[in-house]
């Protein structure tokens, strides 16, 4: 299966391209497949949340949501999706320093997002809504927490990548890695849009 | 010639203009549902349809302007995988909601 796919992709660029380049493209496609498995993971968590959204067992429910903080973190994440795009743009123009700087901006915005999320979780726990309080809160913390975990992993990954770019510069391998981390970051932004809409906006409605 | 130069970088990577348009659209698509919810402009099913619709548009904006799905070369493996993922998503979310929310109501 992978072989025939590789073969087809090879045929695609038989004119004037070396095998190495096709391998990089195949790796990007492999990451795209990983993202689709993440789509499945999040769709299960969303389905669970939607089904359990009324199951508060008489305890606190969506009235604990603080929309102001959520709005700020939504715009922070949207902006970081944009700046990670600018990083990719700088990379393709061969600007190594601009690439690293945009990655730093993206990572700082991502860190701000995580900080806001941790603060929100601490406030919720303080007000008596923990992961064990009710089925609703279990579903909430699992869904939102899984997204937060993805963002945190993306942050570690991005910082590691900055050191690689600093050391090795812009080459086919780092180009692929930046493309992939940017794809991952845009994907997390998409997932957050649905968390924002389904969990928070519909929750306070 | 143009095409060859483009494919040298593998996947398409967009232009500054594209990123700025995408960013502006994503901001607008976030503000509209916010206004609707904060001012109670819509209720019930209408609100849910509009909010989910805005989310779906936002998804399409990210796919086209940031993830460059449209610039993918043929055969469109990324698009095919995406459609497969979305079919599974609709099956899981729609199926769970239908069985656990609506069929549950019948027993009350």
Image (cartoon, grey):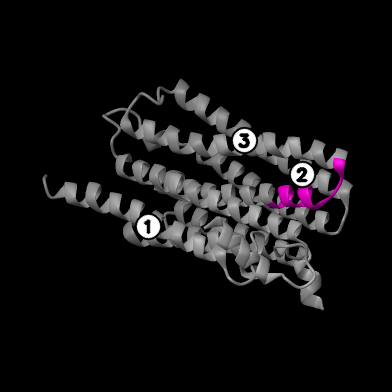
Say whether mark 2 and mark 3 are on the same chain: yes
Asked if badge 1 and badge 3 are on a common chain, one would say no
Q: A106 or A116: nearer the eye?
A: A106
Q: Where residue A183 sits in the image (x, y, percent)?
A: 64, 52
Residue located beneath label 2 in the image: A103
Above/below status of A19 relative to A55: below
Q: Quadrant of the C terminus of chain B?
A: top left
Local packing at callout 2 (Cα closer than 10 Å; few below 14, some 14-19, many 20+) is many
Chain ID at mark 3 = A
Who's the residue at 64% across and 70% down the image?
A: B73
From the viewer's perspective, tell me whether residue B72 is left or right of residue A83.
left
Distance from disc 2 to disc 1, alpha carbons, whole Å, reads: 34 Å
Asked if residue A57 lies in the magenta stretch, the reply is no
Does residue B20 appear in the picture of this structure? no
Q: Is residue A4 above or below residue A148?
A: below
A61 to the left or right of A91: left
Quarter occupied by residue A23: bottom right
**Res A11 quadrant in image:** bottom right
- Tell whether position A169 is magenta: yes
Please provide percent x and percent y for residue A13: 71, 70
Label 1–label 3 contact, CB within 8 A? no
Q: Chain of mark 2?
A: A
User: Around disc 1, counting alpha carbons within 10 Å, would you say few (fewer than 14), some (14 to 19), or many (20 or more)?
Assistant: some
Q: Given this view, does label 3 or label 2 mark the residue nearer the observer?
A: 3
Residue carrying label 3: A153
Q: CA distance from mark 3 to mark 2?
A: 15 Å
Residue A119 visible here: yes
Q: Which residues are magenta?
A: A168-179
Crowding at label 3, few (<14), some or many (≥20) Cα neighbours within 10 Å? few
Residue in the image at 43% along x and 23% along y:
A127
Give the chain letter at badge 1.
B
Which residue is label 1 attached to? B90
């Amino acid at each position: 299966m992978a072989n025939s796919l590789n073969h087809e992709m090879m045929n695609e660029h038989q004119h004037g391209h070396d095998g190495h380049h096709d391998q990089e493209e195949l790796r990007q496609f492999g990451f795209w497949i990983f993202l689709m498995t993440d789509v499945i993971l999040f769709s299960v968590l969303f389905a669970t949340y939607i089904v359990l959204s009324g199951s508060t067992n008489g305890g606190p429910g969506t009235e604990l949501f603080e929309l102001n903080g959520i709005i700020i973190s939504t715009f922070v994440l949207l902006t970081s999706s944009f700046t990670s795009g600018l990083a990719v743009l700088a990379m393709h123009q061969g600007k190594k320093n601009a690439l690293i700087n945009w990655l730093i901006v993206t990572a700082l915005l991502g860190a701000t997002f995580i900080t806001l999320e941790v603060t929100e979780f601490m406030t919720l726990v303080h007000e008596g809504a923990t992961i064990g309080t009710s089925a609703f809160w279990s579903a909430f913390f699992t869904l939102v927490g899984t997204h937060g975990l993805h963002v945190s992993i993306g942050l570690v990954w991005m910082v590691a990548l900055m050191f690689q770019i600093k050391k090795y510069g812009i080459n086919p391998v780092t180009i692929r890695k930046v493309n992939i981390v940017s794809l991952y970051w845009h994907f997390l932004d998409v997932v957050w849009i649905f968390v924002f809409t389904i969990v928070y906006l519909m929750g306070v409605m | 010639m143009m095409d060859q130069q483009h494919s040298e970088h593998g996947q398409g990577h967009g232009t500054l203009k594209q990123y700025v348009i995408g960013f502006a659209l994503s901001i607008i698509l976030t503000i509209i549902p916010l206004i609707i919810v904060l001012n109670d402009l819509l209720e019930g099913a209408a609100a849910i349809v509009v909010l989910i619709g805005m989310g779906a548009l936002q998804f399409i904006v990210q796919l086209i302007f940031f993830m460059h799905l449209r610039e993918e070369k043929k055969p469109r493996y990324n698009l095919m995988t995406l459609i497969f993922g979305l079919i599974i998503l609709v099956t899981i979310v729609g199926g769970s909601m239908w069985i656990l929310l609506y069929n549950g109501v019948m027993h009350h």
